[in-house]
Image: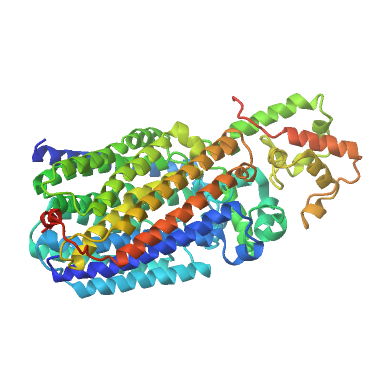
Amino acid sequence: MSDRMAKLIFWVGTLSSLALFLALTFDTHRNFDALTHADRIDERVVAGKRAFERHNCNDCHTILGFGGYYAPDLTRVYTRVGDETIRSRIERPEVVLAASYRKMPQQHVPPAEIVAMIAFFRWTSEIENGDWPPHDSEVRWKSSTRRLLAGAVMSPGAALVNQENCLACHALGDAGERTGPRLEYIGARRSPQYVAEYLADPQRFTPGTSMPGYGQLPEPQRRALAEFVATLASSRRETP
Amino acid sequence: MRYESQRVAYPYFVVALLLFGLQLVLGLWLAFNYFFTVPQAIVDVFPFATARAMHTNLLVLWLLLGFMGATFYAIPEETGSELAWPRLAIVQLVILVAVGVVALVGFLFGWTQGRPLLEIPRPLDLFVVAGVLMFLANVGVTIMRARRFTATQGSLLAGLVFLAVLYLFGIPFYRNLAVDWYYWWWVIHLWVEGAWELVTAALVAFMVIQLTGVERRVVERWLYVELGLFLFTGIAGTGHHYYWVAAPKYWLWVGGVFSSLEPLPIALMLLDTWRHMREARRPLRPRLTWVFLFGMAVLHFIGAGAFGMAHTLPQINYYTHGSQVTVSHGHLAFYGAYALVNLSFFYFAIPRLKRFPSDEYRSTLGHWAFWVMSLSLLGMSLAFGVAGVLQSYLERVQGQPYMVAQQPIRFWMFVAFVHGIGVLAGAVMVIAHLLTLRPEPRVEPAAEGARAT
């Protein structure tokens, strides 16, 4: 190889890659607003991002898959656990995560910052990023809605979810609200035994939670409900 | 050493080595956090996040100080002149170390920019910029005055300017999270797969020319090809970080195609090093310097090339992104490429800076250090790799919640921790060995011939 050839490889290689990269950067900027729903970024979302940075959340948690790998990814935390769980974990981690083998620091985050962070996570949960992360994928939630519909006929637990209006606070599949954690998430983490006991007296497990107690339900019904929630855990990815 | 001003490199090396040791201590603490339940009272005052910020910033700081020291050593020889302002180089070191110390203490008290790897608070960034400008001015003016340009110093200077310019993209506050990460990668990716590769390739070329006596023209011709391939694959290869950040879909193609080519330049660098070693006109002495230099070429390829390639395709990355697989690749790549190129340069330069009668030095401890440190690091990366594959399968494929999927991973983090002790032990030996380097008492005939310059 001649010296000229070597220099040519250097300049052609570098400049072609650079030109492609800058052109695509320009085009990406034209698409960002639509893909991230930039119109929904209000001052509260921005304040939430600042608070997220101020408390260095990102060096334990990942978001969009980037950051520390020590704690759950927060990209879709809002659709996964909802409003109140995010709040209680930031507000009282020493209580809420008392039984966990991994702790979250009590940082005495001011209430206004918590509200802003929830707004930030809500905005983040809606961005269109190729359906990542896979475990919080839309496809997966939708398949659990189908399971619910199929099971409601024969499952007393599913009927109870309906009767007690659980979806007024919890999400299930693509239905329900985002105040508490989604039922699939609870089902994947907790045993039916635990869920049944929790239903009887939520305050015993999570002091201060807005979850009402279901002590008035007969014990077999609480267990049926709990069994149903436990079956919601999607143990494998279903084809859409 | 032929120029008095090359001496300023030595304090840079010493500080870099000490920070390296501290970085590893914090790394062990991080691994410990994964398998042992640290009580809430300790987590409240010294959370994982703080320790991680310290671990990563120490890494960046010591590598950059090492690069700067190496540049101050190499530039006078390349230009054939004294450094423009040797005293300024010391002032610059003091400023950068002060920024480092203030930042580390600040992290302990929660003073942070709060973005991974770029935690240094914005007011301190100004001092970083000031320090780097002093550095570039010093090196730039030295080259301008000497009016002797070589491809090696061109690559070195281009890498350093590129590095400094990219840092600026990490300073602003971005309102949109996706845009934030888009430019975050301009700093992180284009540093490690762009600017730092230029610096590394230049330092390796410099050492190879000096140690083997292979003609400069031959070495620099291949340097051009390496750099062309590094930048061709590396710049557009940034796309492999844009798969899941809400950027357009074409990044899946661009990132996938360009980054699957990224191992090529590293393979070429390994091949070139090997070829120059075979064509050497002098015996390959001192042996330990070569162990580090060639070890760097091999582990650079395995860590950055192979391990990076393993999870760079979008189909795989969808499941492995943001898992311990990234950690596995990150550790072996940073060690193989950048920790070892610095340590190789220290072994190359320190005997010369201390004016040993020949370049030979007592090396027993150093040989042990290399093997203990490198094999432990390989074991550690493999343990992270097993943890990462488990995590990808349990969490991403099976859909288990994060903390449920982490449970079986704790054992592998313990395995990583045990290997981490080995890395720290090896590193302590390297640091002790380099800081107390002694000339070989008996000068072998072969060594006479190996006398460089």
Q: Is residue B74 found left or right of B196 in the rendered image?
A: left
| Residue occupying image coordinates x 14% and y 51% | B209
Quadrant holding the N terminus of chain A: top left
| Residue occupying image coordinates x 10% and y 54% | B449
In the displayed structure, B283 sits above or below B249; it is below
Q: Estimate the x, y position of residue B300 in percent, counting from the top left.
A: 32, 45
Q: Nearer the viewer, residue B322 or B269?
A: B269
In the displayed structure, B412 sits above or below A117; it is above
Q: Nearer the viewer, residue B283 or B28?
A: B283
Q: Is residue A9 visible?
A: yes
> What is the quadrant of residue A208 in the picture?
bottom right
Q: Nearer the viewer, residue A45 or B349?
A: B349
Q: Estimate the x, y position of residue B277 in percent, counting from the top left.
A: 18, 44
Q: Is residue A201 found left or right of A70 in the rendered image?
A: right
Q: Is residue A150 found left or right of B312 in the rendered image?
A: right
Q: Estimate the x, y position of residue A78 in percent, counting from the top left.
A: 62, 46
> What is the quadrant of residue B43 in the picture?
bottom right
| Residue occupying image coordinates x 51% and y 61% | B51
Q: Is residue A27 visible?
A: no
Q: Nearer the viewer, residue B198 or B126?
A: B198
- Callout count: 0
Quadrant holding the C terminus of chain A: top right
- The colour scheme of the drawn protein is rainbow
Q: Estimate the x, y position of residue B212 in percent, counting from the top left.
A: 14, 49
